[in-house]
Amino acid sequence: MSASSKGPLAGIRVADFTWIGAGSYTTKLLADFGADVIKVESSTHMDTLRSTPPFKDGIKGIERSGYFADRNTSKRGMRLNLKHPQGLAIAKRLIACSDVVANNFRPGVMDRLGLGYAAAQALRPDIVYLAMSMQGGTGPHTKYVGFGLTIGALAGIHYSSGPSDRPPAGTSTNYPDHVPNPAHAAFAVLAALNYRRRTGCGQYIDLAQTEPTVALLGTAIVDYAVNGRIAERHGNSHPVWAPHGVYPCLGDDRWIAVAVQDDAQWGRLADALALEPTRRAAWAHSEARETQRLTIDEWLTSETRLREPFDLMRQLQEAGVPAGVVQNAGDLIERDPQLAHRQHWQYLDHPEMGRSIYNNVPIKLSRTPGQLSRPAPMLGQHTEEICTSLLGLTTDEVARFAADKVFE
């Protein structure tokens, strides 16, 4: 491997105590760009993603979760009982030779284990320490436990999601766990590492996962701040643009999204679908379309349901109308030409699951592009390797500690 292909974070080591979605994805971003990320788990406190579907071939097992696999590529895995005195001592040796410590536990958990920021700083004065709890390390709600679903609710995403005449639908964990929180956390780590490079000083990063998620609301926050108005749910419609929504097509559960932003796009849509002149003229201006959006949706549905979605998408796009097929997983993997061109899908050989599909690194750096260097680790897969080659333990010591359940 050439020096340029090792990744821009080659030489950075991360002691990774994170788990579940946002934490695991944060450290995966660092690992895929070359950092040596060592994921610490135990048999009694393993990452719960290991027991989360989908499972390869539908067979449950802690080494068969596609969810865990996709969120933990390029990492090494270490099994360590942090409640055993020797396990804690080994964890401290790991921190002492790491650049970053990361966790997404509730505030106070790492301190009670003896691995809080003060302890880590005593071991490595220039350590970058990432703590990414739900509500942050201070404040009246700091002790609350939360997951992606509750974070989305607290941050207002649920209230904004769904049809106007239905209860809030939410978006499951899609946004909190996979968009703002890992991206903000990884950015914070990079910023702190850059600061350390310039000054020699480490930092404590206190990321409250609700706050990056709140930032997703954007216009709803501005609308309330400026107008005192609470933005209501619109489903797939838009407050101004019409037609704007998802419409049925030929086939089983096939749909297309269409978004008409202005009068010119409306004219092109009407031409493409041969709308009769009378109704075309009546709906020529945005004000009329906004007030008659339901009638327009009925007409558009009557047209789209007769057409194959990909053919219709190409026809509308060529006419200059924003349109996109609502793709499913099969479309994305087997039929999306853009993802195929960018080699988005990568296959890795996993010790138990065999050849499996993964999302490739989505950011293309010209000199140091990053890569999925290895599949997600089996539970404790690299424990002996890390202990002997990095932490200076002998094979006899490793064997003795294993017998003493240090590596449970």
Image: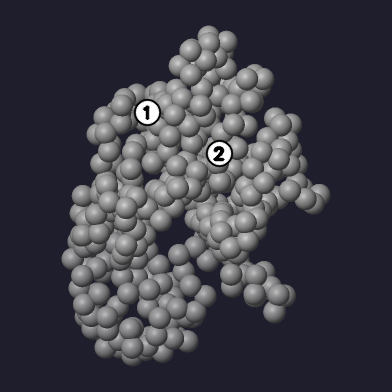
Kindly identify the residue that appears in the image at 42 percent across and 26 percent down.
Answer: 385
Residue 320 location (% of width, % of height): 27, 80
Mark before the other along the chain sequence, 2 or 1? 1
Kindly identify the residue that appears in the image at 70 percent across and 50 percent down.
Answer: 136
Q: Nearer the viewer, mark 2 or mark 1?
A: 2
In terms of image quadrants, where is residue 326? Answer: bottom left
The label shown at residue 97 is: 2
Label 2: which secondary element:
loop
Q: Nearer the viewer, residue 104 or 274?
A: 104
Label 1: which secondary element:
loop
| 380 relative to 365, above or below | above
| 259 relative to 211, above or below | below
Kindly identify the residue that appears in the image at 58 percent across and 70 percent down.
Answer: 218
Give the CA separation, mark 2 to mark 1: 31 Å
Q: Nearer the viewer, residue 119 or 271?
A: 119
Kindly identify the residue that appears in the image at 48 percent across and 48 percent down.
Answer: 12
Residue 262 location (% of width, % of height): 39, 85
Give amino acid for label 1: Arg
Residue 207 location (% of width, % of height): 65, 53
Give amino acid for label 2: Cys
- Left-right relation of 227 to 46: right
Q: Which residue is mark 1?
A: 64
